[in-house]
Amino acid sequence: MSEKQAAGRRGGPPKRARVARSEWLSPAMVRLVFEGDDLAALPDLAFTDHYIKITFGDATRTYTIRALDRERGEMAVDFVVHGDTGLAGPWAAAARPGDEIAFRGPGGAWAPDPDADLHLLVGDESAVPAIAAALDRLPADAAAEVFVEVEGPGAEIALPVTERTTVHWIHRAGRHPGLALADAVQQRPWDPDGLRAFVHGNADMIKDLRRFLFRDRGIPRGQVSISGYWRTGLTEDDWQASKREFMAQVEAEEAAGGAA
């Protein structure tokens, strides 16, 4: 890890920003645009999965930076909203201009390889901001296959695309999060040559797709960024506390099954 990446993961000193405006992208996702003097101190966003950790009392919640506009001094962050469920989602849904946040960051470590023959971008609602930021960064002639799981058609949002981008909206329709998404990705015989993948979202989906991509398709691990952003039934704090153990079990199962 470079010094730049390490500094990003540590998050630096606490910063503050205030809501400038909001925009509902779908009934399940709201974009808050923040402003404030501390945004000028943020580094250039070299990666497309840059995130900040927002403080809510004694808890923190992690959110991807969708965009940073230096000319306007604004930072856009997209929040998934599930009614009154959760901590950050209800706050974001009710946020008004002038409301403040305290945060650390940004962290981040991944961006699409401009030399890849094919970009495979996979995730659920939690990964949509990072997927959209990656699509923003792709060269105009880049080929991309995008798989995004949402509850239903009403939760789909506009995504930036190239002329060679195909977006597959996978509707959960009440199924356990990640199952429909993993099924859809596994229907394709992905060729490891020239493929670069970004796969993030529900931890159980990640477990299934690690096995498929690494063992079944033989894709080298260095060509894939894959991680669980959350796990069903756990708060972010509980998931982060158990993530190391969960991943150790996943890796042990992969080794026992002969994963590449």
Image (cartoon, rainbow, N blue to C red):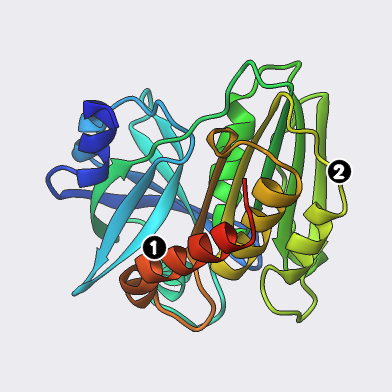
Q: Nearer the viewer, residue 118 or 169?
A: 118
Q: Is residue 177 left or right of residue 201?
A: right
Q: Is residue 43 left or right of residue 210?
A: left
The residue type indicated by label 2 comes to: Pro
**Tag 2's secondary structure?**
loop
The answer to whether 147 is drawn above or below residue 30 in the figure is above
**Quarter where residue 56 is shown:** bottom left
Q: Nearer the viewer, residue 178 or 60?
A: 178
Residue located at (37% from left, 37% from top): 74
Q: x, y percentage for residue 259?
A: 62, 52
User: Quarter holding the C terminus?
Assistant: top right
Mark closest to the chain's N terminus, 1 or 2? 1
The residue identified by callout 2 is 189
Residue located at (24% from left, 53% from top): 103
Q: x, y percentage for residue 117?
A: 74, 21
Q: Is residue 257 left or right of residue 5?
A: right
* Number of other residues with Cα within 10 Å of mark 1, as a class: few under 14, some 14 to 19, many 20 or more: some
**Tag 1's secondary structure?**
loop
The residue type indicated by label 1 comes to: Arg
User: Quarter holding the N terminus?
Assistant: top left
Residue located at (49% from left, 35% from top): 48
* Furthest residue toward left: 13
Q: CA distance from mark 1 to mark 2?
A: 47 Å
Q: x, y percentage for residue 218?
A: 70, 41
- Do the numbered discs 1 and 2 sit on residues whose CB atoms are within 8 Å? no
Residue located at (74% from left, 26% from top): 193
Which label sits on residue 69?
none
